[in-house]
């Protein structure tokens, strides 16, 4: 099957999923199914429900809305598409496919270039990108700690962007989703850099048509890192498949912290978010990736990943000896949970979509803590006891105070230098992938120092509706050739 063609069938269970195909033609094939595989069958009967316990999605050659395959897929909460002629012959074991259980479409992702099933008109992509970007940028606090990034990074922002894009183009990852996933940790790593990249291109006087193409390149990477999805404007942020979530929950059962002590999980999460800021300032994505809510039979799961907790290359004098490198917090909630994520991975609690765009007009009804049932903490390969969690809360409480006090005593020039290093560190995973240094060149330090001494040029103020103004500012769709 050509990767530019799509298979179209009948949607019987909603959802979107990417995984590896396993074609089952008899019960003897059941054993080859691994967790998260896309199971492809001619039809199914009761016995065929067993391999579906591991499946991330189901495809059947025959059937209708009330066939066995359809009913089981819906019950198990996995995407399902049926009535695709010759699908058990067209698809082969090992094929990588994207299953869109909402549109009834399947794309094969084999080969160097990937055609995303979620692909839309390029101009519409650019419009949607601008709308998604405008939400977090428009809601950001003007009083950032230690200072707003733009007030100190502006002298070298265009150089960062040049380096970043050149490294992407030389890396061989363009058109290769697997390579994108090796070069970057997650979609937030690209999203949270996006407006700085655009501003850097504008600083460099790059033609607007070229900027449009660079945004599309950025969206290719975001989609590769996010299972084919481009835009988390205001909704769920789903990274893990159903099987992985179930395994996480099941393996941590022994270490779950129930109510009333489950609040410690949120306390640790809040501390780690603050701790990330003391290390990376606004670049939270270098540590934090929140995702979910993942649907469960009786509620939801929310996962918080905290990585790169010991950036010794960035802060050589800091003591990280008592900190894990990686922590994952899994919290389980009842059905009253109402959270949403924007494109920058910011989490909103208790708002409906339209209300987020008009924050301040009403107070949200908090659901994150009231809905919390229990959860567990995983650090450097091991689930932690409640006592271990208590110890981590103490460790990070001390570090947050110590590290933030250190930065509070910096002069503006010191903050600017460290901010520049943080921004270059944002592309460290890409630099590591291609085998070059992530650090800014020594020649940039005097350039930065001289510009900071002169002060930032004044920018043109936005109009009354900040979100609309930002949507216009970052919309380059009309310039696409």
Image (cartoon, rainbow, N blue to C red):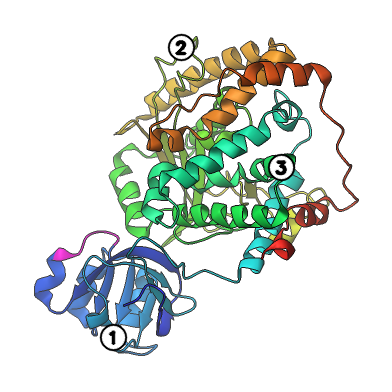
Residue under label 2, please give it.
319
Image position of 138 (left or right of 109): right
**Res 388 → quadrant:** top left
Instruction: Name the residue located 68 percent from the left edge and 58 percent from the top edge.
Output: 209
Disc nearer the start of the sequence (1/3): 1
Q: Which mark is residue 61?
A: 1
- Taking depth in this image into account, of 94 and 476 the one nearest to the observer is 476
Q: Which residues are magenta?
A: 32-36
**Res 2 → quadrant:** bottom left
Element carrying mark 3? helix
Image position of 469 (left or right of 279): right
Residue 267, above or below 478: above
**How far is mark 1 from mark 3, CA to CA?**
49 Å
Q: Main secondary structure of the magenta part?
A: loop
Residue under label 3, please give it.
199
Which quadrant: the C terminus? bottom right
Instruction: Name the residue located 67 percent from the left edge and 40 percent from the top edge.
Output: 196
**How far is mark 2 from mark 1, CA to CA?**
59 Å
Disc 1 versus disc 3: nearer the observer:
3
Disc nearer the start of the sequence (3/2): 3
Residue 39, above or below 43: above
- Taking depth in this image into account, of 441 and 313 the one nearest to the observer is 441
């Amino acid at each position: 099957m050509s990767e530019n063609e799509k298979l179209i069938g009948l949607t019987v269970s909603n959802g979107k999923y990417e995984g590896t195909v396993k074609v089952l033609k008899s019960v003897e094939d059941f054993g080859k199914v691994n967790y998260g595989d896309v199971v492809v069958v001619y039809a199914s009967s009761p016995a065929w429900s067993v391999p579906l316990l591991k499946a991330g999605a189901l495809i059947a050659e025959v059937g209708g809305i009330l066939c066995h395959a359809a009913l089981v897929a819906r019950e198990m909460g996995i995407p399902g598409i049926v009535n695709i002629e010759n699908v058990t012959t067209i698809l082969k074991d090992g094929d990588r496919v994207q299953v869109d259980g909402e549109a009834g479409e399947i794309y094969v992702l084999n080969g160097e270039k990937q055609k995303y099933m979620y692909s839309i008109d390029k101009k519409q992509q650019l419009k949607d990108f601008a709308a998604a970007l405008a939400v977090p940028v428009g809601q950001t606090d003007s009083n950032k700690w230690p200072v707003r990034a733009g007030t100190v990074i502006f002298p070298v922002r265009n150089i960062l962007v040049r380096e970043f894009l050149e490294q992407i183009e030389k890396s061989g990852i363009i058109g290769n989703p697997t390579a994108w996933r090796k070069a970057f940790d997650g979609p937030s790593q690209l999203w949270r850099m996006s407006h700085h990249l655009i501003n850097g291109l504008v600083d460099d006087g790059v033609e607007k048509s070229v900027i449009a193409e660079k945004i599309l390149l950025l969206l290719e990477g975001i989609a590769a890192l996010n299972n084919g999805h481009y835009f988390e404007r205001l909704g769920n942020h789903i990274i893990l498949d159903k099987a992985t979530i179930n395994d996480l929950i099941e393996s941590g059962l022994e270490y779950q912290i129930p109510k009333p002590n489950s609040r410690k999980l949120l306390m640790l999460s809040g501390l780690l978010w603050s701790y990330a800021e003391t290390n990376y300032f606004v670049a939270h994505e270098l540590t934090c990736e929140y995702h979910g809510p993942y649907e469960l039979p009786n509620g939801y799961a929310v996962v918080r990943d905290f990585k790169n907790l010991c950036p010794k290359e960035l802060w050589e004098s800091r003591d990280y000896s008592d900190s894990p490198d990686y922590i994952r917090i899994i919290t389980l909630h009842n059905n009253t949970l109402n959270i949403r994520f924007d494109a920058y991975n910011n989490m909103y609690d208790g708002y409906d979509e339209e209300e987020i765009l008009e924050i301040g007009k009403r107070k949200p009804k908090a659901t994150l803590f009231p809905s919390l049932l229990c959860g567990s903490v995983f650090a450097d390969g091991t689930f932690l006891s409640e006592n271990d969690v208590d110890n981590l809360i103490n460790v990070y409480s001390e570090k947050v105070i110590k590290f933030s006090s250190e930065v509070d005593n910096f002069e503006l020039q010191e903050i600017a230098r460290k901010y520049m290093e943080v921004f270059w560190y944002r592309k460290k995973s890409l630099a590591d992938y291609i085998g070059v240094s992530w650090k800014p060149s020594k020649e940039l330090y005097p350039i930065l120092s001289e510009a900071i001494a002169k002060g930032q040029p004044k920018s043109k103020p936005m109009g009354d509706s900040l979100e609309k103004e930002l949507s216009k500012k970052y919309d380059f769709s009309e310039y696409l050739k």
